[in-house]
């Protein structure tokens, strides 16, 4: 995928929106020194080119009863295009899986899973992960505490 060049104003807009996605266009324009119309056009362009992919609320999982975070390493028995694609498709459909990475090293995939408690995780393993065809090994790492959790992408000199 082609990397798009961002000028200083675009970087500044992105830095502000990453910190406060609910900021009004008027406030954003004032902070970066553009007219509201010019600011809106730049934000719209960032959305249309796929640099801004969406806006969402950040939730506190423990406040809504989803406090157990597990990093799950999955290893495959065989590495075929079909078996890998099938596992990727199935894992992507599980709401408990917040992130899934294909990785190098001892595992083939690392999943970030969020569930209510240990009993919920046990059900998730037995009903979903252990039913996947082609998995040779599953290792679970339980997060003791969260040190850093951000979706903010560093933008160089804009910050």
Image (cartoon, rainbow, N blue to C red):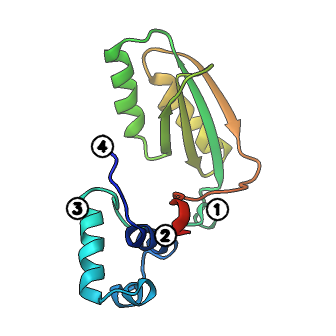
Q: CA distance from mark 1 to mark 2?
A: 27 Å
Of 32 and 21, nearer the camera is: 32
Q: Which residue is pictured at 30% across the width and 43% down the height?
A: 2
What element does badge 3 sit on? helix
Pointer 1 residue? 62
Q: Is residue 54 left or right of residue 97?
A: left
What element does badge 4 sit on? loop
Eye-nearest disc, 4 or 3:
4
- Neighbourhood count class around disc 1 (C-alpha, 10 Å): few under 14, some 14–19, many 20 upward: few
Q: Which residue is pictured at 34% across the width and 24% down the height?
A: 85
Of 98 and 129, nearer the camera is: 98
Eye-nearest disc, 1 or 2:
2
Q: CA distance from mark 4 to mark 3?
A: 14 Å
Pointer 2 residue? 15
Labelled pair 4, 3 in contact (Cβ < 8 Å): no
Check residue 2 in the rendering and tell me which mark sits there, or answer none.
4
Labelled pair 4, 2 in contact (Cβ < 8 Å): no
Counting from the top left corner in percent of width and height, residue 54 is at 34, 63
Q: Quadrant of the N terminus?
A: top left
Q: CA distance from mark 4 to mark 2?
A: 21 Å
Tell me: residue 69, above or below residue 66: above
Tell me: residue 154, above or below residue 110: below
Q: CA distance from mark 3 to mark 2?
A: 18 Å
- Neighbourhood count class around disc 4 (C-alpha, 10 Å): few under 14, some 14–19, many 20 upward: few
Check residue 48 in the rendering and tell me which mark sits there, or answer none.
3
């Amino acid at each position: 995928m082609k990397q798009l060049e961002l000028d200083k104003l675009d970087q500044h807009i992105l830095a502000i929106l990453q910190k406060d996605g609910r900021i009004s266009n008027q406030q954003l324009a004032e902070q970066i020194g553009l007219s509201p119309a010019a600011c809106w056009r730049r934000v719209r362009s960032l959305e249309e080119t796929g640099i801004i992919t969406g806006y969402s609320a950040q939730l506190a999982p423990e406040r809504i009863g989803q406090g157990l975070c597990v990093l799950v390493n999955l290893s495959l028995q065989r590495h075929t295009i079909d078996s890998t694609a099938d596992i990727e498709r199935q894992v992507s459909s599980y709401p408990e899986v917040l992130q899934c990475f294909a990785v190098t090293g001892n595992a083939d995939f690392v999943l970030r899973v969020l569930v209510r408690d240990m009993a919920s995780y046990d059900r998730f393993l037995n009903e979903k992960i252990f039913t996947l065809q082609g998995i040779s090994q599953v290792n679970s790492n339980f997060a003791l505490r969260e040190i850093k959790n951000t979706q903010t992408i560093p933008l160089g000199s804009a910050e």
